[in-house]
Amino acid sequence: MTATAPQPVKPFHRRWSFRLGMVYLALLVISHGYRALQPDPWPAPAGWQTLAETPEDPTDSDGTVHMRYLDTRPSAGPDGRVFLLIHGSPLPASSAFADLAEALAPAGRVLAPDLPGFGLSTRQIPDYGFDAHAAYLQRFIDRLDLDNVHVVAYSMGGGAALHLAEAAPDRIASLTLISAIGVQELELMGDYHLNHALHAAQLAVITIFQEGTPHMGWLDRFPLNRNYARNFYDSDQRPLRRILEKLPMPTLIWHGRDDVLVPPAAAREHRRIVPQSELIMHDGGHLLIFKRPHLAAEDITAFVARVDKGAAPSRRDAAPERLAAARRPFGDVALPPAGGLLLGLYMLIIALATWISEDLACIGAGLLAAQGSISFAAAVTAAFAGILTGDMLLFLCGKWLGRPALARAPLKWFLKEEVVSRSAQWFQDRGPAIILASRFLPGSRLPTYFGAGMLGCPFWTFTLYFCAAGLVWTPLLVGAAALVGNQLIVYFHVFQDFALWVVALAIVLLMAAARILPPLFSFRGRRLLLSAYRRRTRYEFWPTWFFYIPIIFYILYQGLRHRCLTLFTLVNPGIYAGGLTGESKSEILENLKPSGAVARFQLIPPGGTLVERVRRARAFMASIDTGFPLTLKPDAGCRGRDVGIIRSEEALRDYLDQAPGDTIAQEYIQGPEFGVFYYRLPGEEKGRILSIAAKVRPTLTGDGQSTLEELILKDDRAVCLPHLHFAFHRERLMDVLPKGEIFELVEVGAHARGTVFLNRNHLLTPAVTDAFGAISRCFRGFYFGRYDVRAPSVEDFQKGRNIKVLELNGLTSEVAHVYDPHYGLFKAWRDLMHQWKIAFEISDRLRARGHEPLSLGAVINLLLQGEAPPGAEGRGDDKSRDAGETPLMPS
C-alpha cells in the first residue's frame, strides 16, 4: 500500500503561533497592571462635587466610597426645592442627565449623583443591587441634610428609588418614575429565576471578554461593562411590588408608549397599584427622556408644583375607586408577545445565534415561544432564516472560493480539509440527497454544504434539498424546546428556587437529544456515537494536557521537594534539556551508532531544490542497498507526527516537497516493534528496564461488500479513532476491499497515529537488560529514556539479539505500557509518577556531580519554541561519566 503523504505542521507557523500567544498574554498582563494603577474613582471634571462615604457604610464596604455628583446650586442651603436625579444602567448621571438637569435647574436645586459602581464615583463596590444603592443614596441625603426631596428616577434607577422611598419615606416629598422598572411579572420573561439566569449569562460573557481582552482600561469606561452587568445580576425586582403597593408619597409615572425595554403594561400596572399616582404617556420609546428632556422637565416641574401646593394626593388622599382597584390581585397577567421593533430584535438575535450553534439557537427560540415572548411561528421563522443564511453562505464559499479557502481564516478554524474531502466524496457518490441526510447528522452539515459548493452542485438544487431538510428539522427542534418550556412554566411553583439549574439542565438535555437521537437512525451515526463515548471513557484517548494534570502537579511537587523546578533537565546531560522537547533525533542516533544497533539513517537538510533532496534520499537507499519502503520523519518531532512509510517515488517527492525542516531518511525494518524504557542511576554499573510495550499496528480484513469507511466503523478498535483513519485514508474511503484482503490501517508505531500499545513487561529477560545496557553505555551522557526498536521476532527480542533502534526519546518519553487498553487509570498515573520520581533522582545525583540545570526562563522559552535553540547540544562532558566506567560495547 502506498502511504499517503503527510501533512506536516510547519515549525515556523507553530513558532509564530506561540509568539503571538505570548504577545497577547504580555499585553493582557500589561493591561491588567495598567488598570490596577488607575485611580478609583477617576478624576472628576470641574463643577462636580465629591461626597465620601465612611467605611461604616451600610453596605459594609471595606473602604471609603466616593460619590461624585452634579449640583446646580452648590451654595444653596437645606431649604428650598431639591430634585434628586437617579440614573439607570448603563449610563451614569455624568453621561445621561446633563440636559435634564439643565432643564430642571430653573425650578430648583438639582442633584445628580453617579451611583457607586458607575461613572465618576467609586467603581469597585461589594454590591451593585437596588438596596445597596438605596443605602448609598440615604447616606447621601443625610450628609447633605436634605428633606422634602423630589426624587426623579430613570429605568433601573427606579429600583433604587423605591428602596430609598421605603427606607426614608419622611424625607421624600414626591417620586417620579421615568420609564422605570418595577413589578417583576412584567419584566423580560416575567420570572425572577429565569431573568436571573439571563443576567448571569450576560455577566459571564461580559466578564470573560472584559478580563480576557487587553484593552488598557477602555472597556472599563465603556457603558456595557462588567459593572453594568453586575447591577442587573445583583438586583432583585421581587420586593418592588410590595414597595409600590405601600408607597405613601405623591407619584408621577412618566412613560413612552413605544418602550420596548420596560413595556407600557408595566407603567399601567404601577399606576394601578399606586392609587395616588399620575400616569403621563408620550409617543416614544425608552430613550424618550434623552430625545425630549425639556418635555420631561415641563411635566415634572408641573407635578412638583402641585405637590408643593398640596394639590397632588398622597396614598391616604387617593380616590376610593383607585384604592379599590389597587387592592385587586394582580392575577396571571403576562407580557403580550413582542411586536414591532422588539420582535425584530428577538428574531435578529435568534438568527445570528444560529451562526454560532444552530441547535442551541433553535432551543432558545423554542423556550422564548413557550414563555410567550414571541410566537411559535416567529421563533421557527427566525431560526430557519438564520440557518438558511449561514449555510447558504457556506455553500457559496465552497462554490466561489473552493479548497484554498480551507487554509485561511476563518474557515480553517471550524472546517478541516480532510472532513470536507470526505463529505465531498459522499456527495459525489450519493448525489444531492446527502444534503437532506446531513441535516440530521450533527457534525456533517458544514463540511457537506461546503463540499457541495466546491463540487459545483447547482444552486437551486442545493436550495431545494436544503429547504426541504430545514423545514422538517427546524420546527421539530423548536417545537420540542417549546413543549419542554411549557412544562417548565407549569411546574415553576414546584422548583422555582432551583429554576436556574432546571432550565440549564433542560437546555443541556435538549442539546444532547438534538445531537444523539438523529444519529441513532443510521449505522454510521450509531458507530460515531460509540466512538465519542469510548474516547471519553477510555483514558488512552484523552487529550494529553488533560490526562497529565495530576502528573504535572506531581512534577511540581518533586521540583519543590528538590528545591529546583527545572532539575529534571539534567537527567540526560548528553541531550539538550534532557530531551524535554525539540531534541535532534539524528544527533541522538549518531551517539548510539557505535553500538551497531541503530537502523541506518541519513539526515536530509531542507535547503536546495526538491530534486536535490530526492537525489539525496535515493543515494541513501542505494548506499544501504535497499529500495522502498523507506521511513521518513522530521528530525525534531514527537508522537509519530509526520512520520511516513514511503513506498513509491511519487510519495517520496510529495513528502520531501512538504517537509519544512531537517528530515531523517531511515531504512525500513521489518518485524514486531517494541517501546523499551531504560534507565541507569549515576554511579551504578548496571541499568534497569522500567517498561516494555509491544506496538501492534491494527489491520482490517475486506469482506467484498463494505467500503473502507464502513470497515473502520465496524472494527471495535478502529472506531475509537475514526476521524484520524478517515484523514489518512481519505482517498480510499469509498473503496470496497476484496474479500480476505488484509489492509494495514496504521504503518507507524505511534499511539497518536492509531497503534495499539500492549503491556509486555513479562518479556523482560536478563538478556534484554544486558542488550539495552550495552547500547546505552555507548551514548555518553544518557541515563533515562525510551527506545523504539524492532526485532525479527519476539524470540530474538527476548534473547537480546538482532535488535534495531529506530529512535531514542529522552525525558518526556513515557512508559508506554500504561496505554494498554486493559490497564487502569490510577495504575497508569502511578507508573508515570514513578517514572518522573526516577528522573528527579538521576538529576539530583548529577547535580551533586557539578551539573547545572537550565534556568526556568530557558525551559519556558524551549516549551514555547517547540525546538532546541540553534547550536544547542547535550552537555556530555567528563562530569557525566561515572568514575571508573568504560563504555560497554555489544559482544
Image: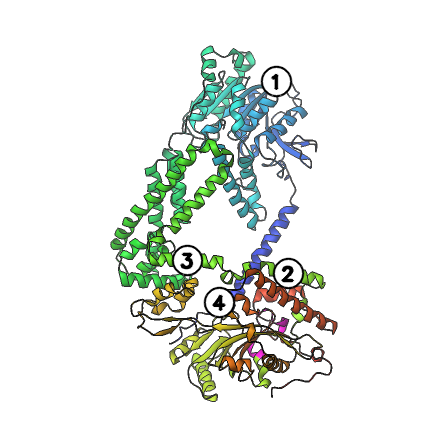
> Of marks 2 and 3, which one's residue comes earlier in the chain?
3
Can residue 410 be seen?
A: no
- Which quadrant is the C terminus positioned in? bottom right
Q: CA distance from mark 2 to mark 1?
A: 65 Å
Which quarter of the picture shows residue 780?
A: bottom right
Q: Nearer the viewer, mark 2 or mark 3?
A: 3
> Of marks 1 and 4, which one's residue comes earlier in the chain?
1
Q: Are marks 3 and 1 in contact (CB under 8 Å)?
A: no
Q: Position of residue 653 (x, y in %)?
A: 41, 78
Q: Are marks 2 and 1 in contact (CB under 8 Å)?
A: no
Reply above or below: 861 against 97: below
Q: Residue at x 37, y 38 (%)?
A: 483
> Of marks 2 and 1, which one's residue comes earlier in the chain?
1
Q: Is residue 586 magenta?
A: yes
What span is colored magenta in the figure?
575-588
Q: CA distance from mark 2 to mark 3?
A: 33 Å
Q: How many marks?
A: 4
Q: Is residue 456 magenta?
A: no
Left or right of 661? Residue 78 is right
Q: Amino acid at mark 3?
A: Leu
Q: Which mark is residue 353?
A: none
Q: Position of residue 140 (x, y in %)?
A: 64, 27
Q: Position of residue 378 (x, y in %)?
A: 34, 38
- As helix, strand or loop, the secondary structure at mark 3 comes to helix
Q: CA distance from mark 3 to mark 1?
A: 70 Å
Q: Which mark is residue 170?
A: 1
Q: Nearer the viewer, mark 2 or mark 1?
A: 2
Q: Which mark is residue 530?
A: 3
Q: Which mark is residue 554?
A: 2
Q: Are marks 2 and 3 in contact (CB under 8 Å)?
A: no
Left or right of 642? Residue 454 is left
Q: Which residue is mark 4?
A: 752
